[in-house]
Image (cartoon, rainbow, N blue to C red):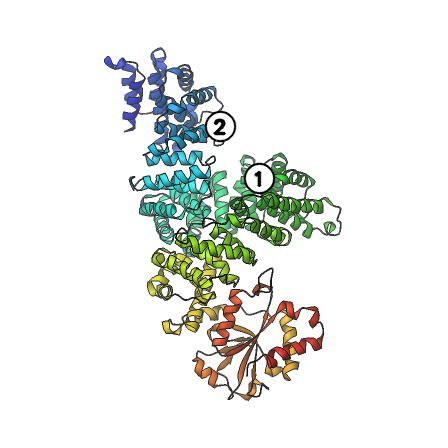
C-alpha cells in the first residue's frame, strides 16, 4: 500500500518519463532498507528528478516507521552523507514540487528529525504558505501536523489554516482530515468555529469506519484542548472507543484515559474494559516504553496483588528506563501512594542522573511527586531546589512561575529565596485567579513556617500578599465574561481564596447574573456548592434558567445543577417544580448513568427529601450494586470511600423515609467498621457535657456519643419522663450494649420495641452541637445534611435539640449561668408536650 503511494508520488514528478522505463525508479522500488536507498542515490546523483528525491525521502521515513521505536535509527539515517545530498536536491527543486509532494516532503523530513530551523524546512514552509489556499484538504491537514510539530500552533500561518477550515468546513467529508485539522487549530478557534467543528465532527463520526478509533480519540483531544465538555459528542466518541478497546495497546488506552480525566468524563464501561485489556497486556509489555504506559494507567485501577507485581517488574526494568520514563513512573507511584522505598529510591536515582535534561515544568512535576512520595534523598531535593530557582529566574510565563513557586514551597526549606519573590512580583499582574490563589497559598506557607516573617508588616512577603489580593480584586472588577471567570475559578480553593476574594467573587458573579445560561449553569452550580456560599440571587437565576431550558441541559448535568440546592438547603421559587423537571430529565437516561454518579445524584435528592421510586429501584438491586463494586475498585481510595459512604447514607435514608420500598438495611457491618475508628470529643462538647450534668442534676442523665439504630452518633442523649423530669439510665432497661470505648450501641431491634423500652410517656432527647460545617459560609442557614440528620433522628423517636456554634460561642452566653439557662430553655421549654 505504502509502496504504491510512493511510486505514484514518484511518477507525478517524473515529467513524462513514464513513457520510457525509469531505471532509477526501478532501483528504488526494489530497495528493502535505508542502505539500499542511499546506494541508489549515490550512484545516480546527476539523474535524480524531483520525483526521485521525494520518493527516496519518503521511503527512508517509511523504513523507520515500520521498525519498533526502540530499533529505529533515525539519527544514523539523518547523518548519512547521501541524506545531505537528498536535502540539497530537495531544496533546489522545491518550485518543481506539486502541492501534495511539497507537503509530503516537509512531513517526511520533520519525521526524520531534521531541525525546524534547517533551510530546507524553512523553504518548504515558506513555499507551502504561498500555496495554502489551493491545497487539497488532505494536504492542508498534513501541513497543519507539520506546523504543530514545529510548535507553531499560535502562528499567523496556523491562523491562515483556521480561516481556510472555517471557509471550507462544509466540504470536509473525511473524518481523519477533519479531526487532524481540529487538533491543529484548536488553540485559535473562536467559540463560533469551535461549535461548527463540533457539529461537523458529530456528523462525520456517524459515517466513518467504526474501527478507526483514532478519529474519535482526536475529537476528544480537541474537546480537551478547547476545554469544552460536550457530553453528547463525548459519549458518541466513547461508544466507538469502547468498541475498540480490545485492539488498543497500553499507549492508546493511557492517552484516552488521560483525556477523559482532563475533561472530568467518567465512563464505567470504558474504565472496566480498559482495565481488562491492560491486564491482558501485562505479559506483552516487556520493553520500558510500553511497560511505563501500562504501569501508569493500570496501577491506580489494579488490585493490591497486581500492583505489587507491577512494582516488582518496574524494579527489574529500572536500569533500562530513560529520564522521561522515570518521570512518568514517579507520577504513577505518587498517584497510588506507593511505599516501596526500593523502587522510589531507584526512580529518584535515575531522575538525578537525568536532571539536566528536564524542562522547567517537568522538574516541577518531579519535585511534586518526590515530595509526596516522601523521598529520602536530601542531595536530590537540594539539586531540585537549585534547578527550580534557576528556571524560575529565567521564566516569563505566569503559569510556569506559579507551578515552580508552588513546588518550591513543598521542599523542606523554610525560607523563600529573594530571587523567587522578585520573579513572582514581576508576573503577578499577568496572573489569572487560579494562579493568584496558588501563589498566595505558597507565600503564606513560607510565612507560617518562618517566625521571622510573622510580625513584620514591612517585609516583602506581606507586601507581595497584599499585591496578590489587590490583583485578584482588580481582575474580578474588570472581568466581563462569566464563562472566563468560571474557568479561572474551576480549581480554586483554600483559605486565601475564602478569606480574601470570595466576597468579591460573589459580587462579580451577581454583576454577571444576566450571562447565566443553560450552558454554564452546571459549572456555576458546582462553584456555589464548593464555596459553601449561599447567594440566593444566583441560585434563583440558576433555577429559572433550568426551568426554562431543561431540555438543553444534558441529563448527566442535572446532578451538578441540583447539588447547591440540596447541599446548601435552599428552596428557590418553584422549588418543587425545579426538582421535578430535573428528575424527569434524567429518568429516561437512568441506565446510561455511571453507577457512582447515580448514587451521588440519589443522595443529593435524598438530602432535599426526594426519593424517586425508579431511582431507588435502579440502585438497590444486585446487578447495579455488583457493577458499582467493580467500578469502585478502579477508583482512587478517597473517591472510593466517598461513594461507599454516600451509598450507606442513601440506604439509611431510604429505610427511614421510604419503608414502603422495602429496601433492606445492609450496611451494618460497614458502619461497625467505621465506628472502630472512634469519635473524638471536642473541648466544646466536653464543656456542654459538664453543663448538661448540672442542668439535668446527674451525670448519669446524659450519655455521650450514643449510637442510634442505623448508626447515627448523637453527641448527647437524655430521657425526660412524662413530667419532663430527667431520667437516669439505670432506672430503665434499654436494648443497647456497651462497647469497649464506653459508647452505647443499639441492637438491631425494631423501632417499636426500642420506643417501648422507655418509661411510659417518656421522651428521648438528642442534643447535637453544630459546628461551622453544618452551616453556609455566609449565613446561619443550616445545610441539607444537618437537616436530613434531624429528620431521621425525629423518625427514630428523638426530640432533637441543636446547639449552633454561633449561639454557644456568642457574647450573650459568656458565663456559666447563661450557658445553663440556654440548655434549660432548649431541653425543657422548647420540647413539645
Location of residue 734 with respect to 120 vertically, above or below = below
Q: Which quadrant is home to the N terminus? A: top left
Location of residue 746 with respect to 126 vertically, above or below = below
Location of residue 570 with respect to 498 vertically, above or below = below
Q: Is residue 548 visible?
A: yes
Q: Secondary structure at mark 2?
A: helix
Give the foreground label among 2 and 1: 2
Q: Secondary structure at mark 1?
A: helix
**Structural crowding at the residue carrying mark 2, measured as other residues with C-alpha within 10 Å and reported as few (<14), some (14–19) or many (≥20):** few
Label pair 2/1, CB-CB below 8 angstroms: no
Q: Position of residue 574 (x, y in %)?
A: 46, 62
Q: Is residue 337 visible?
A: no
Q: Quadrant of residue 684?
A: bottom right
For marks 2 and 1, the one nearer the N-term is: 2
Q: Which residue is mark 2?
A: 156
Q: Which mark is residue 780?
A: none
**In the foreground, 474 or 416:** 474
For the residues labelled 2 and 1, the Cα–Cα distance comes to 24 Å
Q: Which mark is residue 400?
A: 1
Q: Residue at x 47, y 71 (%)?
A: 672
Q: Position of residue 520 (x, y in %)?
A: 48, 49
**In the foreground, 297 or 719:** 719
Location of residue 736 with respect to 563 vertically, above or below = below
Q: Residue at x 36, y 43 (%)?
A: 249
Q: Position of residue 440 (x, y in %)?
A: 63, 47
Amino acid at each position: 500500500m505504502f509502496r504504491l503511494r510512493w511510486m505514484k508520488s514518484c511518477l507525478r514528478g517524473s515529467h513524462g518519463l513514464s513513457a520510457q522505463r525509469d531505471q532509477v525508479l526501478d532501483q528504488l522500488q526494489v530497495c528493502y532498507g535505508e542502505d539500499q536507498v542511499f546506494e541508489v542515490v549515490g550512484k545516480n546523483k546527476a539523474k535524480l528528478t524531483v520525483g526521485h528525491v521525494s520518493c527516496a525521502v519518503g521511503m527512508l521515513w517509511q523504513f523507520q516507521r515500520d521498525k519498533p521505536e526502540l530499533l529505529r535509527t533515525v539519527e544514523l539515517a539523518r547523518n548519512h552523507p547521501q541524506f545531505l545530498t537528498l536535502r540539497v536536491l530537495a531544496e533546489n527543486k522545491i518550485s518543481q514540487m506539486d502541492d501534495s509532494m511539497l507537503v509530503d516532503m516537509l512531513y517526511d523530513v520533520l519525521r526524520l528529525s531534521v531541525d525546524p530551523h534547517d533551510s530546507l524546512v524553512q523553504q518548504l514552509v515558506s513555499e507551502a504558505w504561498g500555496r495554502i489556499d489551493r491545497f487539497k484538504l488532505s494536504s492542508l491537514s498534513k501541513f497543519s501536523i507539520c506546523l504543530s510539530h514545529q510548535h507553531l500552533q499560535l502562528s499567523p500561518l496556523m491562523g491562515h489554516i483556521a480561516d481556510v477550515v472555517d471557509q471550507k468546513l462544509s466540504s470536509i467529508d473525511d473524518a481523519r482530515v477533519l479531526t487532524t485539522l481540529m487538533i491543529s487549530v484548536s488553540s485559535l478557534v473562536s467559540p463560533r468555529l469551535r461549535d461548527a467543528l463540533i457539529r461537523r465532527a458529530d456528523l462525520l463520526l456517524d459515517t466513518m469506519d467504526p474501527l478507526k478509533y483514532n478519529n474519535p480519540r482526536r475529537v476528544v483531544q480537541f474537546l480537551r484542548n478547547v476545554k469544552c465538555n460536550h457530553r453528547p459528542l463525548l459519549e458518541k466518541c466513547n461508544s466507538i472507543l469502547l468498541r475498540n478497546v480490545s485492539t488498543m495497546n497500553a499507549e492508546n488506552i493511557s492517552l484516552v484515559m488521560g483525556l477523559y480525566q482532563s475533561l472530568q468524563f467518567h465512563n464505567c464501561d470504558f474504565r472496566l474494559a480498559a482495565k481488562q485489556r491492560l491486564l491482558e497486556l501485562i505479559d506483552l509489555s516487556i520493553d520500558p516504553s510500553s511497560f511505563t504506559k501500562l504501569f501508569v494507567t493500570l496501577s491506580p485501577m489494579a488490585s493490591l496483588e497486581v500492583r505489587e507485581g507491577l512494582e516488582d517488574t518496574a524494579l527489574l526494568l529500572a536500569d533500562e528506563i530513560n529520564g522521561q520514563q522515570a518521570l512518568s513512573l514517579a507520577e504513577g507511584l505518587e498517584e497510588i501512594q506507593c511505599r516501596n522505598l526500593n523502587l522510589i529510591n531507584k526512580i529518584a536515582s535515575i531522575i538525578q542522573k537525568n536532571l539536566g535534561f528536564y524542562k522547567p515544568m517537568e522538574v516541577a512535576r518531579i519535585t511534586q511527586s518526590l515530595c509526596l512520595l516522601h523521598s529520602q534523598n536530601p542531595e536530590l531535593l537540594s539539586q531540585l531546589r537549585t534547578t527550580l530557582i534557576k528556571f524560575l529566574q529565567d521564566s516569563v510565563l505566569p503559569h510556569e512561575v506559579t507551578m515552580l513557586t508552588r513546588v518550591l514551597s513543598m521542599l523542606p526549606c523554610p525560607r523563600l529565596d529573594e530571587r523567587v519573590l522578585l520573579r513572582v512580583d514581576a508576573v503577578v499582574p499577568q496572573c489569572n485567579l487560579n494562579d493568584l490563589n496558588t501563589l498566595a497559598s505558597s507565600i503564606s506557607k513560607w510565612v507560617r513556617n518562618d517566625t521571622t516573617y510573622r510580625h513584620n508588616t514591612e517585609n516583602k512577603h506581606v507586601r507581595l500578599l497584599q499585591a496578590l489580593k489587590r490583583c485578584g480584586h482588580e481582575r474580578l472588577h474588570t472581568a466581563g465574561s462569566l464563562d472566563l471567570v468560571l474557568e479561572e475559578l474551576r480549581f480554586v480553593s483554600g483559605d486565601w481564596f475564602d478569606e480574601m476574594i470570595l466576597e468579591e467573587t460573589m459580587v462579580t458573579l451577581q454583576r454577571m447574573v444576566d450571562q447565566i445560561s443553560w450552558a454554564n449553569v452546571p459549572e456555576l452550580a458546582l462553584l456555589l456548592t464548593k464555596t459553601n456560599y449561599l447567594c440566593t440571587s444566583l441560585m434563583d437565576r440558576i433555577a429559572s434558567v433550568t426551568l426554562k431550558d431543561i431540555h438543553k441541559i444534558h441529563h448527566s448535568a442535572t446532578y451538578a445543577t441540583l447539588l447547591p440546592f440540596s447541599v446548601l438547603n435552599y428552596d428557590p421559587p418553584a422549588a418543587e417544580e425545579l426538582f421535578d423537571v430535573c428528575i424527569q430529565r434524567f429518568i429516561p437516561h437512568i441506565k446510561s448513568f455511571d453507577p457512582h454518579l447515580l448514587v451521588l445524584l440519589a443522595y443529593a435528592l435524598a438530602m432535599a427529601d426526594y426519593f424517586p421510586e425508579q431511582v431507588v429501584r435502579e440502585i438497590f438491586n444486585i446487578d447495579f450494586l455488583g457493577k458499582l463494586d467493580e467500578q469502585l475498585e478502579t477508583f482512587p481510595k478517597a473517591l472510593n470511600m466517598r461513594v461507599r459512604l454516600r451509598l450507606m447514607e442513601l440506604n439509611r435514608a431510604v429505610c427511614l423515609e421510604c419503608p414502603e420500598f422495602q429496601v433492606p438495611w445492609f450496611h451494618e457491618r460497614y458502619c461497625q467498621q467505621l465506628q472502630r475508628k472512634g469519635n473524638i470529643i471536642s473541648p466544646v462538647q466536653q464543656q456542654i457535657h459538664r453543663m448538661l450534668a448540672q442542668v439535668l442534676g446527674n451525670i448519669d442523665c446524659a450519655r455521650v456519643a450514643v449510637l442510634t439504630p442505623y448508626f447515627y452518633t448523637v453527641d448527647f442523649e437524655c430521657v425526660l419522663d412524662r413530667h419532663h423530669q430527667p431520667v437516669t439510665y439505670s432506672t430503665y432497661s434499654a436494648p443497647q450494649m456497651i462497647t469497649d470505648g464506653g459508647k452505647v450501641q443499639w441492637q438491631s431491634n425494631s423501632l417499636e420495641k426500642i420506643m417501648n423500652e422507655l418509661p411510659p410517656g417518656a421522651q428521648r432527647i438528642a442534643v447535637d452541637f453544630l459546628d461551622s460545617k453544618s452551616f453556609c459560609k455566609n449565613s446561619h442557614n443550616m445545610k441539607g445534611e444537618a437537616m436530613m440528620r434531624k429528620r431521621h433522628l425525629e423518625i427514630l423517636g428523638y426530640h432533637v435539640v441543636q446547639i449552633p456554634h454561633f449561639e454557644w460561642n456568642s457574647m450573650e452566653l459568656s458565663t456559666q449561668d447563661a450557658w445553663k439557662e440556654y440548655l434549660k430553655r432548649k431541653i425543657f421549654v422548647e420540647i413539645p408536650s
